[in-house]
Image (tube, coloured by chain):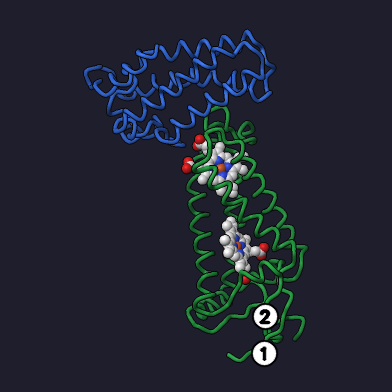
Chain colours: A blue, B green
Amino acid sequence: MRKLLISTVIAATAATGAIAQAPSDVAKARRAFYTLVGYEMATLGGMAQGKVDYDAEVASQSAKDLLTLTGYHTADLFVPGTSNEDLPGETRAKADIWSDMEGVQEKGMAFYQAVVELNDVAGNGLDALRPAVGKLGGTCKACHDDYRAADF
Amino acid sequence: MTDRLEKTYLWDPVVRVLHWALVIAFFTAFGLGKFGPDQMTLHFYAGYTVAVIVVLRVLWGFFGFYTARFANFVKGPGKVIAYARTLPSTTPSRSYGHNPVGAIFVVGVLIVLAMQVLTGMLSDPEDYINVGPLAQYVSIETARKALSYHEPLSFLLLIMVIAHIGAIFWYKTRKGENLVTPMITGYAELPPEKIPHRQ
Ligand code: HEM
Ligand code: HEM
């Protein structure tokens, strides 16, 4: 999984117009991917913040789904020419992503690591879940700070 | 100038305590927002502290001591321009309370601080941990709009604060007036004819 993620990001730099998809469709698929990540996080975040009752089964499943998503080969979601400068109103992905793939990769690894740690503890009760979700959410923010615009 | 100066009670304790509390809370909120941990709980607490200070100061602006009340220091454009003309001179202003130009900063910074807090509370940064408490009551579009204003507003506040500190410095170096000590002790040296209830 770890190898996959790294190769993903490296491949993204190489990925070019060779993939015959309209830029808008790439952006749409990319947002759909992160929508899924957010969907699972909403469940976990809700539990961590006490808005939803903790359920070991549900928490473990969401954590597992996040792990599955980290196995998704995202290179083709980061085709050059699909930043918010290229597609205003369609995406919030900043052009900085394509000029700093190394940084993106580093933040992606932190995200992956936090997902793994979360999977170790998600079923072990609310007190174990909370710090792991907090750490994972922090890796979302770290990437957003540099690579995602606040609004479209 | 050979004004006859008298030790005068200028700022009441509420104004003074709120001011220095605001200084601490503002820089804490700003610093934690910009450089703090990715889990922003402490930033939120600092922001709420600012909110409480702003609300109390606005209330005090209606019901507080003479120099604290907006009605006594907010002036029209005529007085603002007239006072602004005196700013470059080396003559001390010896104002009893906020001067008409300073009043613009006071009201302005309270408004922008309120906007800063409100946009923060409405923000949904979509990380599922640092969500403002009011974001759940508005659409995600509104929550993103709020988030997109929160950072530019913080920059505007920083500029306003730098201008504020610059102005205090200007009074000290150009006009030889120390405005900081009265904000700490409550007392200033002023000519009696500047004090409304002594006229
Ligand atoms: C005077 C009070 C406040 C100041 C000076 C302030 C300042 C800041 C600053 C400088 C940032 C970083 C912006 C950036 O560089 O991207 C930030 C981010 C943020 N603040 Fe505040 N803030 C205040 C109050 C609040 C309050 C009351 C809340 C919520 C209850 C809040 C929620 C947030 C959120 C959610 C973020 C952004 C997170 C992100 O983009 O990932 N802030 N704030
Ligand atoms: C170390 C930094 C600061 C110093 C030395 C300072 C000094 C002062 C002084 C001397 C006054 C009285 C001005 C007058 O005579 O009319 C004042 C008023 C004020 N300052 Fe500051 N200030 C500082 C930082 C800040 C910050 C960071 C904020 C807001 C975020 C702020 C907001 C205000 C407000 C709202 C007033 C009006 C006070 C009132 O009427 O309640 N100041 N400041």
Give the side of residue B82 with respect to residue A56, left or right. Answer: left
Side of A96 relative to A112 (left or right) = left
**Chain name for mark 2:** B
Q: Position of residue B20 (x, y in %)?
A: 65, 58
Residue B108 appears in the rendering: no
Amino acid under label 2? Glu
Q: Nearer the viewer, residue B28 or B102?
A: B28
Residue B131 drawn at (x, y percent): 59, 32
Rendered view: B91 above or below A116: below
State the SS at label 2: strand
Q: Which mark is residue B185?
A: none
Q: Quadrant of residue B182?
A: bottom right
Which quarter holds ligand 1?
A: top right
Separation (CA) of disc 1 from disc 2: 9 Å
Is label 1's Cβ within 8 Å of ligand 2? no
Seen at 62% across and 40% down, the residue is B44
**Residue A123 percent location from the top left of the image:** 62, 10
Instruction: First in sequence, mark 1 or 2: give its number.
Output: 1
Kind of residue sitting beneath label 1: Arg
Please identify the quarter of the rendering in which residue B132 is found. Answer: top right
Residue at the disc numbered 2: B189
Q: Are marks 1 and 2 in contact (CB under 8 Å)?
A: no
Are the residues under marks 1 and 2 on the same chain?
yes
x%, y% of residue B22? 64, 55
The correct choice, above or below, for B33 with respect to B97 in the image is: above
Q: Which mark is residue B4?
A: 1
Q: Secondary structure at mark 1?
A: loop
Q: Residue furthest left?
A: A18
Tell me the residue at 37%/28% (across/down).
A104
Q: Quadrant of the C terminus of chain B?
A: bottom right
